[in-house]
Image (spheres, grey):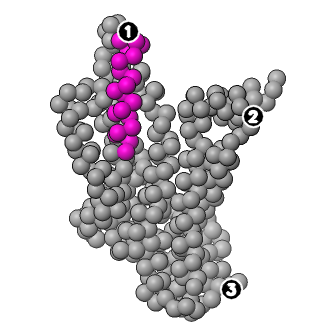
């Protein structure tokens, strides 16, 4: 038996993997690195490998101390260890990104299925609403919602909701267009002729056919939400100040930035860019696994 027969079909690599597949593998490895760092951050603190990024006791550190064996990434102007805040910043970023993208996927897919299948006035109202949201830049929507929420109610759930609203129209439009094109197929007519309810048709026949393009959008929106969250933190509208976050750390670093103190901006900015690039690369090859036609062409090449 050949090795390709052992793995599930959607996990089989083409014999001659394209560049997009290798970019996807690179992106997944980068993303997994940040996921592992975020998961083990509390354990690293318990083992005294990193300092507590929020404890006032670390203020005994020398402000703007250069990278050394004691402080791998140096310290900021308040004396906080930059390495500890960068590690915990990955934890905060992934929590918000995952929550925001799941929020937008759930609402976008459900509304897209309902709108595309029912049509009529429901479709027209939802189209108008989603087109109105889509016409507004996502960062502006996130800034407006974060400002409306207020500082007292800020946290991971509120930040995720502020980011997720801007991405709902993207999932809605893709799912709605696929639903409109599929609902006239013969197997759909047969299901209706056999007396299947709209709920059964949507969940059993439509959902599996329109969901294939969602993973690509998911990773792209996740990459964008990393940068949007950083922009909110830089503007002071992101997570509370006691939660380490890359955008807020960049804001604090630039307030006291000098040409000699480069580490306070380099490492948070590099971490933010690396996670965003990793998620973007991960989306490059997903279509070859979730699109049967592209996967077949790759296998035959």
Residue at 32% across, 7% down: 193
| Residue drawn where x is 35% and y is 12% of the image | 189
Where does residue 125 sit, x and y in percent of width and height?
19, 38
Q: Which mark is residue 68?
A: 3
Measured from the top left, where is residue 225 in percent x and y? 43, 58
SS of the residue under disc 1: helix
Q: Residue 69 vs residue 261: left or right?
A: right
Magenta stretch containing residue 174, yes or no?
Answer: yes
Q: Is residue 81 visible?
A: no
Return the residue nearer the eye: 172 or 149.
172
Q: Nearer the viewer, mark 2 or mark 1?
A: 2
Residue drawn at (48%, 71%), measured in percent from left and top? Answer: 246
Q: For the residue labelled by badge 2, is the local secondary structure a helix, a strand or a loop? A: loop
Residue 262 shown in magenta = no
Q: Nearer the viewer, mark 2 or mark 3?
A: 2
Q: Which residue is mark 2?
A: 15
| Quadrant containing the C terminus in the rendered view | top right
| Image quadrant in which you'd find residue 277 | bottom right
The alpha-carbon separation of the residues under discs 2 and 1 comes to: 38 Å
Which is nearer the eye, 273 or 57?
273
Residue at 49 percent of width and 56 percent of height:
223
- Stretch in magenta: 170-191
Question: Mark 1 highlights which residue?
Answer: 190
Q: Is residue 43 left or right of residue 93?
A: right
**Above-or-below relation of 175 to 95:** above
Question: Would you say the residues marked 2 and 1 are in contact, meaning their CB atoms lie under 8 Å apart?
Answer: no
How far is mark 3 from mark 1, CA to CA?
Answer: 70 Å
Label at residue 230: none
| 252 over 295 or under it: above or below | below
* Badge 2 or badge 3: first in the primary sequence: 2
Q: Residue furthest top?
A: 194
Up-down: is 68 above or below 213? Answer: below
């Amino acid at each position: 038996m050949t090795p390709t027969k052992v793995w599930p079909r959607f996990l089989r690599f083409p014999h001659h993997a394209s560049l997009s597949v290798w970019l996807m593998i690179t992106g997944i490895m980068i993303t997994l690195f940040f996921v592992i760092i975020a998961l083990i951050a509390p354990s690293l603190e318990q083992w005294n490998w990193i300092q507590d990024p929020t404890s006032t006791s670390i203020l005994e550190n020398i402000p703007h101390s250069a990278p050394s064996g004691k402080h791998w990434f140096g310290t900021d102007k308040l004396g906080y260890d930059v390495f500890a805040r960068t590690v915990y910043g990955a934890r905060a970023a992934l929590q918000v990104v995952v929550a925001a993208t799941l929020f937008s996927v759930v609402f976008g897919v459900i509304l897209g299925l309902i709108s595309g299948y029912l049509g009529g006035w429901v479709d027209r109202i939802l189209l108008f609403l989603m087109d109105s949201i889509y016409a507004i830049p996502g960062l502006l929507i996130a800034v407006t919602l974060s400002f409306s929420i207020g500082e007292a109610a800020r946290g991971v759930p509120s930040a995720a909701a502020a980011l997720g609203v801007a991405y709902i129209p993207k999932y809605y439009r893709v799912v709605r267009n696929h639903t409109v094109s599929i609902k006239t197929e013969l197997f759909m007519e047969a299901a209706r002729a056999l007396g299947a309810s709209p709920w059964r048709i949507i969940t059993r026949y439509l959902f599996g056919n329109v969901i294939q393009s969602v993973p690509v959008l998911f990773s792209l929106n996740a990459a964008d939400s990393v940068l949007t969250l950083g922009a909110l933190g830089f503007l002071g509208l992101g997570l509370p100040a006691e939660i380490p976050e890359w955008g807020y750390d960049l804001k604090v670093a630039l307030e006291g930035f000098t040409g000699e103190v480069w580490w306070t901006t380099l490492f948070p900015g590099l971490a933010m860019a690396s996670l965003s690039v990793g998620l973007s690369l991960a989306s490059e090859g997903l279509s070859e696994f979730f699109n049967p036609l592209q996967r077949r062409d790759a296998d035959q090449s």
